[in-house]
Image: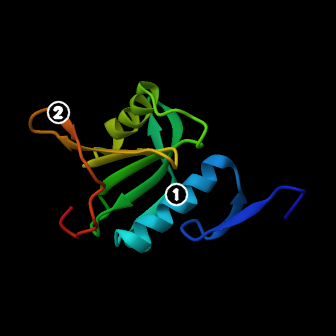
Amino acid sequence: MEDKILKVFDPLRKKYVALTPEEYVRQHFTAWMTGNLGYPASLMGNEVPISLNNTKRRCDTVVFRSDGSPVVIVEYKAPTVAITQRVFDQIARYNMVLRSRYLIVSNGLRHFCCEMDYDRDSYSFLAAIPVWSPYL
């Protein structure tokens, strides 16, 4: 604990960060993705910077393919924050820059995953978050 702020080590950023409710969700979700779904930590990044309409933003978590292209974007909210259309609008704006295949939103209690279809300019919600495959 530093300056009376509880911190947790983020293995993806390789540093200690303040343990906010959103950070709690991020740490558990990324651990679940790596431990249960097989996502390689080496291809994941937390707080990934992007430029959107000349403003700097940060994606909560991005999973990349081995060629460096983004395949999954995850947006986290605290458990007390409802998953609303506004949350989906936020991740959709980030995806205008990254053009990821999968978008995931989680507040630690509820998780939603959709797969983008750029050929049809549409998306579909999935029943489960896909297990890692190099072919995602």
Tag 1–tag 2 contact (CB < 8 Å) = no
Q: Residue at x 34, y 61 (%)?
A: 64
In front of the other: 63 or 29: 29
Residue 129 vertical placement versus 44 (above, below): above
The residue pinned by badge 1 equals: 46
Residue 11 vertical placement versus 103 (above, below): below
Q: Quadrant of residue 84?
A: top left
Distance of mark 1 from mark 2, alpha carbons? 27 Å
- Image coords of residue 30 (percent x, y): 48, 62
Q: Residue at x 38, y 49 (%)?
A: 73
Residue 17 vertical placement versus 97 (above, below): below
The kind of residue tagged 1 is Asn
- Image coords of residue 43 (percent x, y): 39, 68
Q: Considering only order in the chain, which callout, 2 or 1, is on the residue closer to the N terminus? A: 1
Q: Is residue 28 left or right of residue 69?
A: right
Quick one: which residue is furthest to the left in this view? 119
Q: Is residue 8 left or right of residue 79?
A: right
Residue 73 vertical placement versus 1 (above, below): above
The residue pinned by badge 2 equals: 122
Mark 2 residue crowding within 10 angstroms, few (<14) / some (14–19) / many (20+): few
The kind of residue tagged 2 is Ser
Question: What SS does tag 1 mark?
Answer: strand
Q: Quadrant of the N terminus?
A: bottom right
Q: Quadrant of the C terminus?
A: bottom left
Quick one: which residue is furthest to the right in this view? 3
- Image coords of residue 16 (percent x, y): 70, 65
Mark 1 residue crowding within 10 angstroms, few (<14) / some (14–19) / many (20+): some
Question: What SS does tag 2 mark?
Answer: strand
The mark tally for this picture is 2
Check the image and tell me how it is coloured.
rainbow
